Amino acid sequence: MQSKFLKSIVASLAIALSSFANAGLITTIDFENGSLDPIFNYSGNVSALNGATYFYDKSGYRTMADGTIGVYGMVSYEYYYPGKTIELAITSGLFDLNSFKIAGSWGSQTVTVQGINGGGVSYETTVDIDNTQIDVLDLGWINLTSFKIIHGNNFVADLSVNANCGGCGHFVIDDIVIGQGFDHTSVPEPSTLAIFALGMIGLASRRFKKQS
């Protein structure tokens, strides 16, 4: 009898936990096929680029290629136009922007990153980038239709890398990690799960005491 009751408790917990499950898909977009991933629509002058073809040791292309798996990345070719924006919009539904990597192509600047939902700005942050290091933006932004990267107004070229690119303020991004299919409205707080589990344990305890 006790065994049957324990089985029913376990089954109830399994059903409850399955209802709490928040199934979704995590995808890393790394452009390794040499083209822009069709999961997004792209606005602005962008392309997928093989960073290994750039022999400049300190360019952002080589920095990104050396610091990631593979050699491709997505490059913004907007040169140096303060306030110029590129946008990546999901082709269907909503997505979560978990993280991505970014480096300046030929120098340093402060860029603004915005998470967009239906045309409105839901999230915003700024990051200082340059051509000598990769910045990893761990964002955790949810329920987006697109995200934007806006060129800063403080670009400084690293002329020791490329003396002919004083106005080349573009940048390269890679390893965009997104989530799709997550229902953020139904995720219970840990306290909810704890209360439920304690309640089931309490019921089991009372049942055993009565039988003993």
Image (spheres, rainbow, N blue to C red):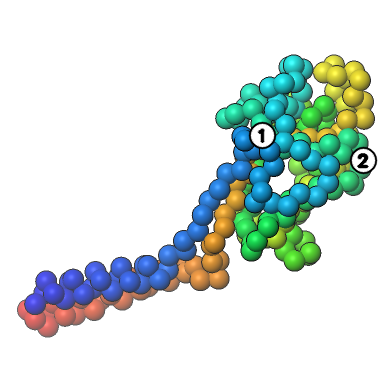
User: In the rendered view of the protein, which quadrant contains the N terminus?
Assistant: bottom left
Q: Amino acid at mark 1?
A: Gly
**Depth check, front residue: 176 or 160:** 176
Q: Give the spatial CA distance, label 2 vs label 1.
A: 26 Å
Asked if residue 75 is positioned above or below residue 132 in the image, the reply reads below
Write down the quadrant of residue 211 in the picture: bottom left
**Depth check, front residue: 78 or 159:** 78
74 lies left or right of 166: left
Horizontal and vertical percent position of residue 50:
70, 28
198 lies left or right of 75: left
Asked if residue 162 is positioned above or below residue 67 in the image, the reply reads above
40 lies left or right of 184: right
Mark on residue 81? 2
Q: Is label 1 in a helix, a strand or a loop? A: loop
**Depth check, front residue: 164 or 125:** 164
Horizontal and vertical percent position of residue 160:
85, 16
Q: Residue at x 21, y 75 (%)?
A: 8
175 lies left or right of 193: right
Asked if residue 40 is positioned above or below residue 183 in the image, the reply reads above
Q: Are marks 2 and 1 in contact (CB under 8 Å)?
A: no
Q: Mark 2 packing: few (<14 Cα in 10 Å), some, or many (20+)?
A: some
Question: Outermost residue, left direction?
Answer: 212
Horizontal and vertical percent position of residue 18:
37, 67
Horizontal and vertical percent position of residue 45:
83, 42
Q: Is label 2 in a helix, a strand or a loop? A: loop
Q: Amino acid at mark 2?
A: Tyr
Disc 2 vs disc 1: which is toward the camera?
Answer: 1
Mark on residue 34? 1
Q: Residue at x 60, y 51 (%)?
A: 178
N-term mark: 2 or 1: 1
Q: Mark 1 packing: few (<14 Cα in 10 Å), some, or many (20+)?
A: some
Write down the quadrant of residue 129 in the picture: top right
